[in-house]
Each structure stands twice: as C-alpha cells, then as structure tokens.
Amino acid sequence: MQQNNHSTPSRRIPSIAYFLFLTRWLQLPLYFGLVLAQCVYVFHFWVELSDLIGAVLGNQSALQHILDTVTIKGADRPEKLTETAIMLVVLGLIDVVMISNLLIMVIIGGYETFVSRMNLEGHPDQPEWLSHVNASVLKVKLATAIIGISSIHLLKTFINAAAYDEKTLIAQTGIHLAFLLSAIAIAYCDRLISQVDRHPEA
C-alpha cells in the first residue's frame, strides 16, 4: 500500500528575506529600555510611599515633600497632611502602578507578538491575557490601560478643581473623552476584522 506524503516540502528562505526577518531583533534594546523605565517607576513609587509613611509618622522633611507634590500652582498650600493630600498621593501611586502595568503589557506582549515566542504555555505564572495576545488584542488592551491612566489624572484634577480654570477642566475632560472614543473605535474595528476572518467570502 502506497503512503502519501502530504508534508509541505521545505523551501530555502531567500537571503534578503532572512535578513529582514532577523531585523526584528533590533527591537530588543527598545524593550530593555522599557525595563529600565520600569525600574525608574519602581524607585519613584517607593520614594513617594516612604514619604507618605514618614509624613504620617511626623517626619517634617517627608511632610514638606508631600505638600510640595500635591500643591497645585495657584492653590492654597495646606499646613498639614490632610485627607485630600493623602488621597492625591495615593492616586499618584495608583497612577504609577497603572503605567507600570502598561509597560509590562508593551514589553511582554510586544516581544511575544513582534520578536519571538516566549514558550510560556503551561507555566503557572503565565499572564492570562498572554495566551491569546496578538497585535489587535494588544492595541485594545493598551487603549484600555491609557483610559484608566487618563481617568486617574482627571480625578486628581477634579479633586483640585478650585485651582484650575474652566478651560483647563473642559480640555482635560475632552481629552479623556477622545481617549475613550478612540478605544471604542479600535475595539469596534477589531471586532469587524475578526468577523471577516471568521466568515470569509466564498
């Protein structure tokens, strides 16, 4: 009985194509640069957190640094650590965490999508979103993360609304809405492309 071999014969990749394919590794230093940026954010987070704890415990130097951080130009400077000041510092810490999450998505998702597979299947610490990440999913997740970061900045502005003029408040709200509409448009376009891929024309 004759056995048919349906395997695709191996073809030699043209030299120019192979060279262009190798250029994807030029992105590697960029991701290492983002890792260094992540380290800077970690350091900034701990500096702000230590100052907050020190201010609560009565450290005057830490208190002055916190008040300098949360005081908006043109607003009255508080003389002590108020609930509003604590809230603004905590929102700043949350902002750092969300930007850090954004960096992780860009570093890991970008490397997995555009450079090389990480082969993390079955690893207990594999991020849930990484199992189905592609360029479209990555764009939607990044847009969602940016909306979250913009929301934190907008909330910080509204807490200190008295220190801003009406044009600034309207402008920041409009920018946030623009981010929101852009994310909706990206998700909608991705959904349309997915439907076309699942139901190609005959």
Image (spheres, rainbow, N blue to C red):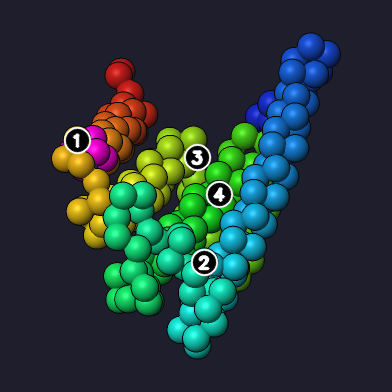
Can the viewer see residue 109? Answer: no
Q: Which image quarter: residue 121?
A: bottom right
The C terminus lies in quadrant: top left
Residue 199: assigned label: none
Residue 192 horizontal/vertical position (percent): 28, 29
Query: Which one is closest to the eye, mark 3 or mark 4?
Result: 4
The residue positioned 52% from the left and 66% from the top of the image is: 65
200 shown above or below 139: above
The N terminus lies in quadrant: top right
Q: Earlier in the sequence, mark 4 or mark 2?
A: 2
Can the viewer see residue 202? Answer: yes
Q: Earlier in the sequence, mark 3 or mark 4?
A: 4
Residue under label 4:
103
The residue positioned 46% from the left and 61% from the top of the image is: 68
Residue under label 3:
134
Residue under label 1:
167
Type of amino acid under label 4: Leu
Q: CA distance from mark 2 to mark 1?
A: 29 Å
- Look at the numbered discs 1 and 3 and tell me whether their residues touch, using CB distance below 8 Å: no
Residue 196 horizontal/vertical position (percent): 31, 26
171 shown above or below 127: above
- Give the residue furthest to the bottom: 57
Give SS at disc 4.
Answer: helix
